[in-house]
Image (tube, rainbow, N blue to C red):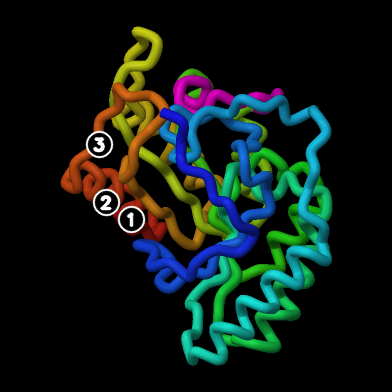
């Protein structure tokens, strides 16, 4: 599967099952995915570009001007967004001016739609960078990925392209002191003749232990909704997801199934 890529900086607004009316921002190249993960389920397809290689980034000014114009247009149509959401073709925090772009976004949100939330969807791999961490801490919704309990499943599902461990990710997520949302994808299947299943009880148990340490404000639990680069993955039933969510709620942590 080639994958779906966004061909604009600002896109939408779109109706999101998690974020309502969402105006999207893609800080990444429009012709390929750029990410520190190579997740087997990513709708953008496989990561084929080395993240250590030079990239021609959109400038901060270009991004700010594009967002400003879109918000002006929405105001003229009396179409308020629920969220301004950083997503797009990979990991948004990789943009070298990410923190400054967040500052610009907060300023424009406050001018045009002060009730809108600012949301960042991140894979949690760049949180060692204090500038990125502090920028995320300022926004409304840090939606940060944690799909696995063990290192083995982490490697199978997320296939990191940089040196990072699940232990380091959990450590960094804990630093938010609850000011974050965890998003977790659950699936079953086979990749390269290996069984992948993060719904088994032993894996969920360790994942729950991570959540106890992190203490997020919410856990978003979901499964495959779109075509995946690996064609041998199974969607988890709503009933199975609800059982996992109940275990999260039993820890005193809010959970929602999508």
Q: Which mark is residue 235?
A: 3
Image position of 251 with respect to 77: above or below: above
Identify the residue at horizontal 49%, vertical 39% (top origin): 44
Could you tell me which residue is drawn at 66 percent across and 38 percent down? 125
Towards the viewer: 9 or 115: 9
Task: Tell me, yes or no, whether the highlighted magenta stretch contains residue 11.
Answer: no
Q: Which comes sooner in the sequence, label 3 or label 2?
A: 3
Nearer the camera: disc 3 or disc 1: 3
The residue tagged with tag 3: helix, strand or loop? strand
Residue 171, image x and y in percent? 65, 40
Quick check: marks 2 and 1 in contact, CB under 8 Å? yes
Left or right, 174 with reference to 61: left
Query: Residue shown at 66%/68% (left/top)?
Result: 139
Q: Check if residue 162 falls in the magenta segment.
A: yes
Q: Secondary structure at mark 2?
A: helix
The residue pinned by badge 1 equals 249
127, 230: nearer the viewer: 230
Position in image of residue 195 (x %, y %): 32, 15
- Relative depth, front residue between 213 and 134: 134
Q: Residue 153's x, y, as percent?
A: 45, 23
Is residue 37 in view from this perspective?
yes
From the image, which quarter does the N terminus lie in?
Answer: top left
**Callouts 3 and 1 close, C-beta under 8 Å:** no
Q: Residue at x 55, y 80 (%)?
A: 116
Work out whether residue 177 can be spotted: no
The crowd level at tag 3 (other Cα within 10 Å; few <14, some 14-19, many 20+) is some
Q: Nearer the viewer, residue 230 or 173?
A: 230
Distance between mark 3 and mark 2 Cα atoms: 19 Å
Residue 236 against residue 214 in the figure, above or below: above
Q: Which residue is mark 2?
A: 246
Magenta residues? 153-164
């Amino acid at each position: 599967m080639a994958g779906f890529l966004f061909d604009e900086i600002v896109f939408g607004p779109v109706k999101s099952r998690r974020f309502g009316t969402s105006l999207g921002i893609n800080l990444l190249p429009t012709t390929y995915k750029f990410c520190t993960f190579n997740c087997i389920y990513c709708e953008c397809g496989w990561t084929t570009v080395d993240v250590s290689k030079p990239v021609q980034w959109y400038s901060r000014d270009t991004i700010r001007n594009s967002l400003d114009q879109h918000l002006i247009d929405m105001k003229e149509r009396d179409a308020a967004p629920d969220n301004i959401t950083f997503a797009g073709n990979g990991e948004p925090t990789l943009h070298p001016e990410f923190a400054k772009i967040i500052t610009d976004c907060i300023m424009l949100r406050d001018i045009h739609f002060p009730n809108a939330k600012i949301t960042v969807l991140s894979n949690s791999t760049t949180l060692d960078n204090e500038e990125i961490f502090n920028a995320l801490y300022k926004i409304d919704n840090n939606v940060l990925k944690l799909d696995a309990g063990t290192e083995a499943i982490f490697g199978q599902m997320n296939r990191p392209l940089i040196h990072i461990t699940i232990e380091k990710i959990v450590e960094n997520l804990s630093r938010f002191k609850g000011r974050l949302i965890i998003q977790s994808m659950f699936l079953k299947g086979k990749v390269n003749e290996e069984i992948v299943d993060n719904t088994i009880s032993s894996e969920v148990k360790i994942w729950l232990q991570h959540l106890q340490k992190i203490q997020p404000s919410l856990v978003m639990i979901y499964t495959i909704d779109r075509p995946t680069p690996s064609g041998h993955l199974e969607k988890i039933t709503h009933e199975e997801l609800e059982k996992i969510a109940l275990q999260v709620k039993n820890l005193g942590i809010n959970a929602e199934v999508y």
